[in-house]
Every structure is written in C-alpha cells, then in structure tokens.
Amino acid sequence: MKHLLSTQDLSARSALRLLDTAEEMAAVGEREIKKLPALRGRTVVNLFFEDSTRTRISFEAAAKRLSADVINFAAKGSSVSKGESLKDTAQTLEAMSADAVVIRHPASGAPARLAASGWIDAAVVNAGDGTHEHPTQALLDAFTLRRHWARITGTPSAGTTLAGMKVLIVGDVLHSRVARSNVWLLTTLGAEVLLAGPPTLLPVGVGSWPCRVFYNLDDALAERPDAVMMLRLQAERMNAAFFPSTREYSRRWGFDDGRLALLDTMGLDDTVIMHPGPMNRGLEISSAAADSPRSTVLAQVRNGVSVRMAALYLLLSGDPQDDDDAVDGRADQDDPPATTPEGRTP
Amino acid sequence: MTVPASESGIHKRVVLAEADIDRALTRIAHEILEANKGSRDLVLLGIPRRGFPLAQRLAQKISAVDPSVDPDLITGQLDVTMYRDDLRRHPTRSPLATQLPPSGIDDKVVVLVDDVLYSGRTIRAGLDALADLGRPRAVRLAVLVDRGHRELPIRADHVGKNLPTSSQERVRVHLAEIDLIGGSPVDEVVIEDRA
C-alpha cells in the first residue's frame, strides 16, 4: 500500500489489516506513555485546502504518537491565496522532504492527482476530497462498528469482519464523501448497507451502488438496523433548493426524540447512533439522540486517532525501495513478517 | 538426522526434538525459580509469536513446582514491532497484541522469553518497549536457542541450548501451539542449510 486514496479499491484483506493494526494502536492510547518510536525522523504534512477541526487534529495526534514530525498547512493564509497551484504547493512540500502528505481538498480527485502525477514521491493520504471519498472516516466508522459488534456478540474484535451487520446511512448522501466511503468499505467488510434520504439528496446512479435505498426514514428503521449513521446536512455545498425548509427536513429525515424512543419500543437495545461530525443539533440529529448512551460520536473521534495511526504506520514504515505489489503481496501472507523471530532473517 | 529437501536444495537437520525441548524448558523453569529465590514478583513476557507459547509452558512448569502460582496471572505477551530498528529495511510488519498480566510490570522481575537469540536486536527493541510500559525491578532473558552472532551487548540469563551456527544457516523453531506440519502439530528445532 503506497497511498490511501479511496475505500472503493481497498481489498477486504487490506481493510482488515488496517483495522487490526488500529486495534493495537488503540491499546497504545490507553497506556501511560502514549507514544511509539515507529516513525521517528519521518515528516507528515497536513495539507488542508478546506476547513477541518477533528480530521486535522486527529491526523496530527496520530502522527505525533508515532513520533513523526508534523507540518500543518492551511490554504488560508498561505501562498494558495496568492494563486499558487496544487502542483507548486506539493513540490514545495516535497523539497522540504515530506514523507507523507495528508490532503483535504474541495475538488474530487485532487489526492489521486497528487499520487499519480509523479509530482511528489511522498505517500498520499486522502483526508476528504470534494464529494468523492473520505477513507479514514469510513475506516474509523468500521472500527467503531466492529468493536460494538464484538461487544454485543462477546467475541474479540481483531480479525473479524462486519458480516451480519445492517447499517443505515441517512440524509445528505449527495454531498457526502463519508457516505460514499462507507458504502464501499462496509460492503467490502460484509455488512449490509441501507441508504435513506430525500430523492433530491441522493446522487444519480445510486441504484447501481451495492445497497438498498429508502425514501422514508421510518420505513428504513423498520428494517431493524444495527447502526444508524446520520450524515451532516452540508449547507455550504448546497447551491440549489434541495428541500422546502430545514424544519421539514428535520421532521422527515432528522433523528429526533420520537425516533430515539421508537428504537426502545422496537426492542432495538443494541442499535447505535453514529455521526461523523460536526453535528447540526436539532437538524439532522436531536440533542437527546446525540447525547444518549446509544451515540458513538465521541468513540468515533477516539477511534479516529487509532485508525489514522494504523494508516500512517502501514504507509510509512516499510522499505520504500520495495515496489508496491511486492509489499502488498508479502504483507498479505498468513504469517506476517512481524512475527519472524530474529533467528530467521539477519 | 539429515533430511535433504527434494527440490530446493535445502538440508534440514533436527537439533532439538519434542522431548529435548521439554527437558530444556523444565530446566529453565527451575533456573528462573532458583535465580529469583522463589516465584515472588515473577512475570514472564513472551515475544510474539513463538516466545509467547514458550512463556506459557514455562509458567506451567513453574506452577507445577510452586502450586501457589497461577500460570495465567504471571504470563503476558510483549510485541516489539514498533520498536525495531529495521522497520524500513523490510516490508511493512503488522504489530501484534501486547498483553500484560493484571498485576502489571512495575517493580516486578520480568523474564523476557523468546525462541531464538541471534543478533540481539529484538531484545533491544523489547527493552525499549518495556520502558514505555512500566519500570520492572529487574529484567532477565530466557531463550530456547542461542545461536550466537550477537550484534549488541546482550546476553541471555537462561538458555535452552547453545547452538553454534554459521550465518548462512537458518534456525527454525516449530511449536505445537502454532505450527502445523502436514496437518499435525510439531515441536522441534531445525537447522536449515542452503547448500
């Protein structure tokens, strides 16, 4: 794995490897000394062309826990506002010998362009591009779901998939890179994905996605999902009238107090409510739902650091001279080289 | 006993069979108890993967001598992957679980357990990993096989067998808990020679 650009082309094996590695990283977060020396001397650049709080902080914390040096770059207040191109910005970072570039960009495909263009040698991590993908968010959601599933079934979470889980994603799918990444990843991991939203906020071609689509939230809830993921209504990307009023949206598509009570009356005691954040309280999710014991919002943030540590570690720790296929091929063996005792390879 | 491998030209020689391994571990268990003057504050940490089953076996043997010891409560696993100095020279390694016994390692006598001691670099990584987890009163090292060729000033306190080898040879340890050969669990130490 040289770059992490999307979950659509992530194999089940690679996804499981990321999640299992994140499991070990999570254990580090519970220690007194929350630091590992694995990426000592490597430089991670956070290249953010869009506003972000938790993703940037999460990547920064992840890189620092692995002892990497972190350079934060925000487009605001930089030469980008003077008209510098993505290529020139990237090459500037390359000249400062960045080993990994974590990029968020308003244009879909910008990270893929950076990775494929040959402008830089660094590993590229997609931290959200336009309305395309946000792979680390999907990975942390899968990680949260897997831990929840392991807790209610009483099995260890490492090594297991999400087979048998039913996950409902609700709201503004059209503008949501989180929804797209989750549809691909959760399906790859064996979960059944349901989408619900107003037709105006579902993308063209959603019928070809590997999931069932509902145009009524209560019909979708009647399918008894194990997790309900509420998406943020992305007002900043809305340049047309997608629904009559926020009040109507909230009543038809919001996870309000009534629907929270409905989960109890339906006997869905183990159904969790997820939200990628930032939340519009009172719009797509009510305060009671966001603060209920069912809510995994804070667990998602906590798991985000572990998952991003896993991604940075797997991208940066191996031999850079190995070509991609060989790394992937050998890394996916049943007996990982990590276990090789020192008697074998000098 | 020499078994020439059919196609690859690798010669295999079994240097420790199941009974030899068992005898060596019994002796090491007694040595650990003797050096520690009893089982007080003992913690056995196996280095994955084959150090961990060895640590479990040693704990069983210690509890056979001293029935007040619960083998599960003194055994743990210490993953050293993230502390290795050769991460960039190999394909990416996946970290494995670190599990400490419930009593922790602070002020304990920690015995690191591994299958083969070679360059000493794994143990160096293990010492660094330990320092991030707590402050043991003392750290000792028990290995099933010491094959020499040390690259660091590290020495084992308890050795199952000293095995003079050439660096061209490979020492493979197979343990019944992990290794299946031809579908059946095997306990043996083999030297492979690429002739």
Image (cartoon, helix red, strand yellow):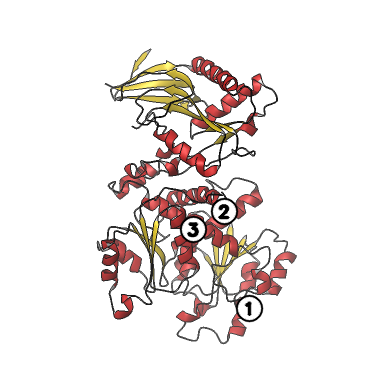
Give neighbour class at mark 1: few <14, some 14-19, many 20+ (Cα, 10 Å). Answer: some
Task: In the displayed orientation, state which residue is furthest to the top.
Answer: B1
Dot 1 or dot 2: first in sequence order is: 2
Q: Quadrant of residue A295?
A: bottom right
Tell me the amino acid under the disc marked 2: Arg
Residue linked to disc 1: A282
- Asked if marks 2 and 3 touch (Cβ < 8 Å), the reply is no
Tell me the amino acid under the disc marked 1: Gly
Q: In the rendering, at what x and y percent does residue B116 appear?
A: 43, 26
Measure how far apart labels 2 and 3 are at the Cα level.
10 Å
Q: In the rendering, at what x and y percent does residue A306 appear?
A: 50, 55
Q: Could you say which is closer to the camera, residue B124 or residue B165?
A: B124
Name the quarter where the C terminus of chain B is drawn. Answer: top left
The residue positioned 53% from the left and 60% from the top of the image is A141
- Disc 1 chain ID: A
Measure how far apart labels 1 and 3 are at the Cα level.
27 Å
